[in-house]
């Protein structure tokens, strides 16, 4: 089964090479790497065009002509995917591509349509960073679960894997970090078979390039209400 790996990328010049190498060296055998540069201004865009694109390591690199947000980059990348399976991969180093096989196993085994990689279950390494982020994640997951009637432990995780026809059937409306609650609500309404798998998490600090903030948390609450109650 071909795996399409969608990488939304904005200002990740320090990590983009390393994450591509990690994906390339990951044990999953058939991979299609799709990078969507969301109008980076730190040299990422130039690195992609001058070095990474000519190297042939990446199947597709798509460029936004203005900064639109993570959700918009995912929308572009998901449309371009042709694999049997699709997984979301941030361009930083917070998530380990070496765990793809374990995340995808429930889908490959025919038991799941969607798999969430949970940072908060299992015994894998988890970098200790921000208390308030953890509390915020828990509250957002709880609110989402109350309205979707799912029992997820980590709705906000980056690692979401799908059968391609499932994710391409969903109209993604959110342009920023609202993608996570939006896609969770829409998947729940499709009555998909959803699994969770415990994953490692190597979180970044803001000094190291973390971008999400409290305003995104407020917007996530609005998205949970919007896509569960008003759609």
Image (spheres, rainbow, N blue to C red):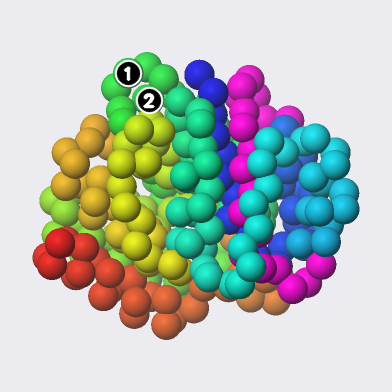
Residue labelled with disc 1: 110
- Where disc 1 sits, the SS reads loop
Asked whether residue 196 is in view, the answer is: no
In the rendering, which numbered label is found on residue 107?
2
Q: Please name the residue shown 62% across and 43% down the image.
A: 34
In the rendering, which numbered label is found on residue 45?
none
Quarter holding the C terminus is bottom left
Q: How many marks?
A: 2
CB within 8 Å, label 1 to label 2: yes
Asked whether residue 72 is in view, the answer is: yes
Q: Which residues are magenta?
A: 25-43
Where is residue 194? Give x, y as percent.
28, 37
Observer-nearest of 45 and 11 = 45
Where is residue 224? Give x, y as percent.
24, 66
Q: Quadrant of residue 195?
A: top left
Q: Is residue 172 magenta?
A: no
Query: Image check: 18 left or right of 105?
Result: right
Query: Image check: 102 left or right of 205?
Result: left
Q: Main secondary structure of the magenta part?
A: loop
């Amino acid at each position: 089964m071909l795996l399409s790996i969608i990488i939304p990328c904005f200002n990740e010049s320090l990590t983009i090479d390393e994450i591509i190498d990690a994906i390339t060296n990951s044990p999953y055998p058939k991979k299609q790497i799709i990078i969507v540069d969301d109008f980076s201004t730190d040299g990422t865009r130039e690195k992609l065009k001058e070095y990474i694109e000519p190297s042939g390591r990446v199947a597709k690199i798509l460029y936004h002509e203005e900064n639109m947000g993570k959700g918009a980059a995912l929308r572009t990348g998901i449309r371009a995917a042709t694999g049997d399976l699709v997984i979301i991969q941030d361009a930083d180093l917070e998530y380990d591509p070496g765990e793809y096989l374990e995340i995808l196993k429930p889908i490959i085994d025919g038991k799941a349509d969607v798999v969430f990689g949970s940072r908060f279950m299992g015994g894998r390494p988890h970098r200790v960073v921000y208390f308030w982020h953890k509390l915020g994640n828990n509250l957002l997951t709880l609110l989402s679960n109350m309205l979707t009637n799912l029992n997820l432990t980590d709705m906000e995780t980056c690692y979401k894997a799908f059968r391609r026809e499932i994710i391409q059937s969903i109209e993604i409306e959110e342009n920023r970090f609202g993608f996570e609650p939006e896609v969770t609500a829409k998947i729940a309404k499709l009555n998909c078979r959803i699994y969770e798998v415990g994953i490692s998490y190597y979180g970044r600090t803001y000094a190291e390039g973390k971008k999400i903030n409290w305003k995104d948390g407020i917007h996530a609450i609005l998205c949970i209400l919007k896509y569960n109650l008003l759609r």
